[in-house]
Image (cartoon, helix red, strand yellow):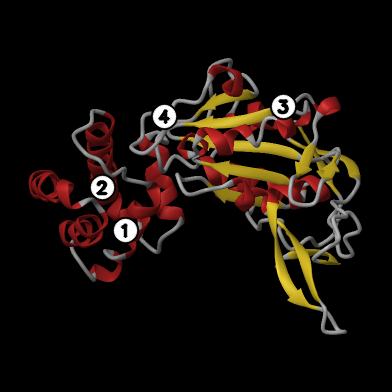
Amino acid sequence: MSRRGVLYPMTDNRSATDLDDIQTVGRRTGETFSEFAVLEDVEHEKVPSVSKEEYHHRTLSGERTDVEVVTRALELGMNVVLKGPPGVGKSFLARYICAQTNRPLYRVTFSETTYREDLLGHLHLVSSDNGETVTEWIDGPLTRAVREGGVILFDEINAADANTVAALNAVMEQRATRSLTLPQTGEQLTPHEEFRVIATANPGYQGTYELNDAFEDRFRHVKLDYLPESVEVDLIFDRTELERAREGEVQTLVSFANRLREAYMDGELSTPITTRELVRIARFIEEDFMTLKQAARSELVARVDEFDESLVRTLIAKRL
């Protein structure tokens, strides 16, 4: 749903500061999820729904889990960037934390065609009740998160061009000096005290850029990798109707996926293989609808880049 502001005549240069339907986050409850404060549930429409059992906590260096490290950084007001190959659960981790702490999550997926208006919002022309043509301000996802105290998720931030990234500098300063200016209206916002920034990055992925050192220095970096094989096997059973008697097939599938992931990391394959795809393959071997080889071929050959088809078909034939 768009967040609307005041209507202005086309000749009026006032800023859109008097928004009439902002729903800010709830107060802190005194409870925490891992290291991050839990907020009152105000039934905000943008709070994700993810149960505590849906995410596997991974131990990082320093003997702390990914959830502990990320929630600690967020509680301290740091910006967090989650790095790792596609499909390791970076965006899902952000959703998971927001769900457990009652925080609205706004998401922007960056590309070369993402512009600052996609983040901040825009003015558009409408007709008022008296027939006069006026402009109406519509908040973008970043502006909504700033106003409401939500979390903004910048997905694939290293796919954004330098001009778009530059628009984020002021809002990612230290908490005491953060601000956001809307150039179209002249409004300058001080972010809500619960506003937080999470970004994801796929280092070295096709179509991405190297972030400059000054911008990277604004983040607490957290590296994520694929789940251990035994954990991914259990996850597939949790998300399918397969019986444990078929554990050998699922183990073979996960081992095969890790071979494809090695090929991706080595540059042999341009398409990453995610846990979601493994779950879909497993759903198609339920009730013997397909063999494992048929289900993998059906899912992956249609999924990968056309230049990867030959290698994927060969590996399926040899390993499944």
Callout 4–callout 2 Cβ contact below 8 Å: no
Label 4 residue SS: loop
Where does label 4 land, which residue? 203
The residue drawn where x is 88% and y is 51% is: 26
Marks 2/1 in contact by CB < 8 Å: the verdict is yes
Q: Taking 169 as reference, is 87 above or below it?
A: below
Mark 3 surroundings within 10 Å by alpha-carbon count, few (fewer than 14), some (14 through 19), many (20 or more): many
Could you tell me if the residues under marks 1 and 3 are in contact, i.e. CB atoms within 8 Å?
A: no
Question: Mark number for residue 282?
Answer: 1
Give the crowd class for mark 4: few <14, some 14-19, many >=20 residues within 10 Å: some
The spot of residue 268 in percent (x, y) is 18, 34
Give the residue displayed 77% in from the left and 67% down from the top.
135
Q: Which mark is residue 272?
A: none
Q: Which residue is mark 3?
A: 78
Reading the image, the residue beneath label 2 is 253
Q: Quadrant of residue 267?
A: top left
Badge 1: few (under 14), some or many (20 or more) residues near its Cα, within 10 Å?
A: many
2 or 3: mark nearer the eye: 3
Of the residues shown, which amino acid type is indicated by label 3? Answer: Met
C-alpha gap between disc 1 and disc 3: 39 Å
Q: Residue at x 45, y 44 (%)?
A: 112
Q: Disc 2 or 1, which lies upstream in sequence?
A: 2
Q: Quadrant of the N terminus?
A: bottom right
Q: CA distance from mark 4 to mark 2?
A: 26 Å
Q: Earlier in the sequence, mark 4 or mark 3?
A: 3
